[in-house]
Amino acid sequence: MVIKKGSLIRLKFLDGKKAFIICGGQSFEKSGYLEKLEKHLAASKIEIVTVKRIIKDPTEDSINTIMTQLKDLNADWIIGVGGGAVMDTAKLIYALYENQNMPLSDFEKPHSVPELRKKAKLCLIPTTAGSGSEVSNSAVVTINNKKTPIISNHFIPDIAILDPNLTISLPPKITVHTSIDAFTHGIESYCSSLNNALTNSYSVAGAKLIIENLEEVIVSPSNIIAREKLMYGSMLTGLAQSMTSVGGVHA
């Protein structure tokens, strides 16, 4: 994991031949960072296929539709770039790509996803400071009109890149909403019956970073230091929640 301004350039050093990229809405593409991402991978001589504008929470149907583009690609990297819904989509796609004879419904029981990394590796790149999905062991998908968490430690990515530059183009409203979501993760983890000294330290430190830097990011959107701290706080509370449990807000 790397948390640093300009860290997207680390993609230049990926080892592989083909990458399947799943990315979010128009703002990321308009910001020019999708083009930069693709250029970094091209510098590694990695062939890419990109699925754009994944903006809704994943459903079994949407995941199966994306899988038709990946099935015969022989990708050795699955890369999710966006908010929580996009990164969750990447995790679910990864699970099906590695286990193509299994439907998502086979993974509903916690930790029932078979061992991954037989074909590819997973890279997650958040473009918001909110979900913490880049460090979590879960992905939420709607199966038969029911939101279902798929939980597997295999979802922890091989590489997580947290580049605060990718959050600068976010509208203030989304910045606030995602940050409050991250703050809530910290509260839920701290109040969980599964908490412990380690998770509490993550919850408190992460929530503190969010409180101290959110207003500054809204007042000065280009303050990259505050944005980096906000991403760090979101990552910590996401990690804490992943190690404990969700509360009523996310149930």
Image (cartoon, helix red, strand yellow):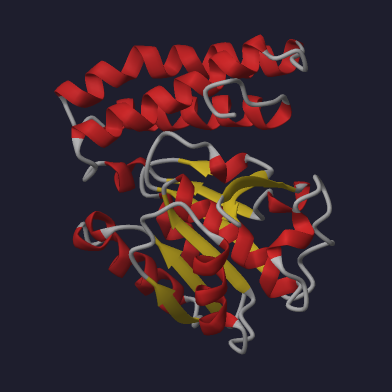
Q: Residue at x 49, y 67 (%)?
A: 62
Q: Residue at the location (56% across, 11% down)? A: 204
Q: Nearer the viewer, residue 27 or 229?
A: 27
- The residue lying furthest to the bottom in this view is 72
Relative to 251, is 244 on the left or the right?
Answer: right
Quadrant in the picture for the C terminus: top right
On the image, the x and y values in percent for residue 57 come to 46, 51
Report the side of 73 relative to 25 (left or right): right
Rendered image quadrant of residue 193 = top right
Q: Is residue 111 above or below residue 118?
A: above
142 or 123: nearer the viewer: 142
Q: Locate residue 120 relative to residue 79 in the image: left or right.
A: right
Q: Inspect this view and state whether residue 247 appears.
A: yes
**Image location of residue 96, percent across then percent down:** 68, 70
**Is residue 229 visible from the viewing direction of this image?**
no
Quadrant showing the N terminus: top right
Q: Nearer the viewer, residue 175 or 111?
A: 111
Q: In the image, is residue 186 above or below residue 154?
A: above
Q: Position of residue 241 (x, y in %)?
A: 63, 27
Q: Residue furthest front?
A: 145
